[in-house]
Amino acid sequence: MPAALSLPTFPTDAASLPSDLADSLGRIRHVISDTDNTMICHSTALRDAAGRPSDELPRTLVAMASAGMDVIPCTGRNRAMIREDARILGLPGWIGEMGGILCLHEGQEGGWRYFTADMPYDPSCGRTPHDVIMATGVVGRLLDRWYDCLETYNDNNIGYQYREVTVALRGAVMEDEAQRMLDETGLPLYLADNGFVSRVTGKTILPAAQSGHLEDVHTYHITPRGLDKGSAVRRYIELMGWDPAEVMACGDSPADCAMAPHVGTFLLMRNGIDNPKAQAALATSGNAWVSSRDATDGFCDAMHTLVELRRRS
């Protein structure tokens, strides 16, 4: 049996929990969550996992705020996208571009910063970290090598160049070979698999997308080595001065599972349970649960349990 299949299902009845578990989960005050296919489905906060109109997520976020809980989205989306999402949903901060941009408090002077982990970066150079990566030419070489099954990922159809730290791609590649090409640049770079896409908008060259087989289309991010959602979450928690035991992280992809070692509790969405990379990442984790239902539905179930526990404490 795959290791991830033995993960316990996150409780949906707070009243039935033993006191020690209720006390532990009741400490959670901060939730750092992936967005697509975790907190949000179908690119809207007003639909459930099946695509039906629903106000469950907004009501859940209101309940969490009333209970004194923070929700911080952690996503591969660029600054323009996640900043607007967070503003509309009333969320106090965010983590964008796979951890490459940390916003500690929206609207606060100096509240955001680049995070490039192992990649040297001088902010006075006049270029973004994204520009530094593009200048190596490796993105063009990757696109030439996989000319019929890889393309740049155009955020909101406005162009991949609107990113500041990472480079986003989608399709399917031989990841070991792609990583070797990144290693040849001389920069410490890494190819991160951020899971499968849920939809493809705009023009595409990908045969799998054109035929509707989205289970074959990965979202990849070229990132500075050492930069992933895990290292970004660790740094975010340090900057905020939070106790990791009071933090839950949520996600559905292998990239999201990197957050698990840096928080007290990790929630893997049920729709991500069959991903072998996610299973491997959590095989030895002692703090991971699986959601009761897929994506938004399971996220809301878990958050309602946390809200109820905090109200009892």
Image (cartoon, rainbow, N blue to C red):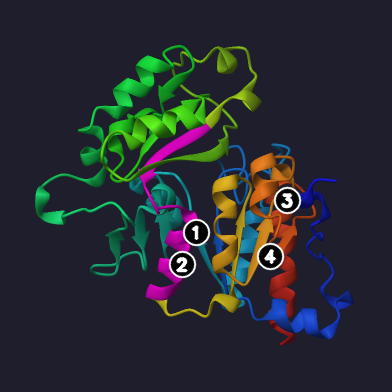
Q: What stretch is highlighted in magenta?
A: 219-239
Q: Does the magenta stretch include residue 238?
A: yes
Residue in the picture at 45% in, 52% down: 228
Residue 244: x %, y % from top left: 54, 75
| Label 3 close to label 2 by CB (< 8 Å) | no
Distance from label 3 to label 1 (Cα)?
24 Å
Give the residue at mark 2. Answer: 234
On screen, residue 283 versus residue 258, left or right, reads right
Distance from label 1 to label 4 (Cα)?
21 Å
Residue in the picture at 46% in, 12% down: 148
The one of 26 and 144 positioned closer to us in this rendering: 144
Residue 245: x %, y % from top left: 60, 78
Give the residue at mark 4. Answer: 303
| Label 2 close to label 4 by CB (< 8 Å) | no
State the SS at label 1.
helix
Residue in the picture at 40% in, 32% down: 180
Q: Which quadrant holds residue 147? A: top left
Amino acid bearing label 1: Gly
